[in-house]
Amino acid sequence: MQQEFWHERWQLNQIGFHNQEVNGHLQRNWPTLNIAAGSRVFVPLCGKSNDMLWLLAQGFEVIGVELSPLAVKAFFAENGLSVTIRQQGQFSVSETEGLRIYCGNFFDLSANDLAGVNAVYDRASLVALPPKMRAAYALHTHSLLKPGTKTLLVAFDYPQHEMQGPPFSVQTHEVQTLYREWCNVELLQTEDILDREPGFRNKGVTRMQEQVYIQTAL
């Protein structure tokens, strides 16, 4: 999927993927990872997600990466956060106490950019990518993370032919295929969400599940 697609979505404010509320799966399942307070948490393709503020409030440091400068600017402005901005390589880096967002291409990140990261929260990253990009995404993620890093991954499972993504359907067998060579993958929870997500039903989707995984890098 071309970068222009996401820039246009933010420019036109077509951001139905953004949730004002903190994700329920994050709140319920994050403690299962047993991540020590003060640890660094990476949030890929973070947008202006308020999930980052929740993680910050739990005592974690947060590092995000986001392609759209509009999303990054909106996150700090809408939450009334003071911000310092600097250039680091190919990224514009926006920082406030305990939180840093790299604005640029996820695939330009290096392991040094994520030094000290012990956990990852992926609610909107893997599912935002079309099939041809997902293997490259998983491979680059592997290059960024040290062994023992734990990931809370949220994915969708629905009949892909019924709706054009994003978000895309990423079924359990694909998650296993993408990550099993370098991660232990555990399916933690499956939840039917079609009744509380009428937008998907209106698009003709007949079955919609959210699936929550815990992954541990080997």
Image (spheres, grey):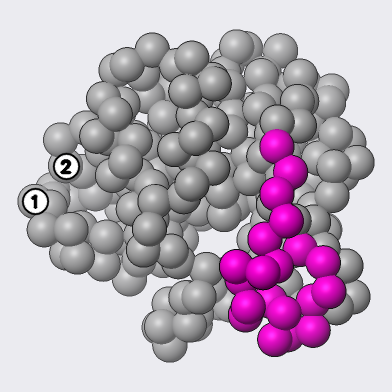
- Quarter holding residue 156: bottom right
Under mark 1, the amino acid is Ser
* Quarter of the image with the C terminus in it: top right
Give how far across and how far down residue 175 sits, in percent. Answer: 81, 40
Under mark 2, the amino acid is Thr
Q: Nearer the viewer, residue 117 or 110?
A: 117
Q: Which mark is residue 47?
A: none
Q: Nearer the viewer, residue 179 or 52?
A: 52
* Rendered view: 71 above or below 109: below
Q: Secondary structure at mark 2?
A: strand
Residue at 34 percent of width and 53 percent of height: 50
Give how far across and how far down residue 137 sits, in percent. Answer: 69, 45
Q: Please state if 212 lies on the left or on the right of 100 as rendered.
A: right
Give how far across and how far down residue 90 sits, in percent. Answer: 41, 50
For the residues labelled 2 and 1, say whether their Cβ atoms are less than 8 Å apart: yes
Q: Secondary structure at mark 1?
A: loop
Q: Callout 1 environment at 10 Å: few (<14), some (14 to 19), or many (20+)?
A: few
Residue at 63 percent of width and 78 percent of height: 198
Q: Which mark is residue 82?
A: 1
Which contiguous range is marked in magenta?
A: 189-208
Instruction: State the CA–CA distance, disc 2 to disc 1.
Output: 6 Å
- Residue 41 appears in the picture as rendered: yes
Q: How many marks?
A: 2
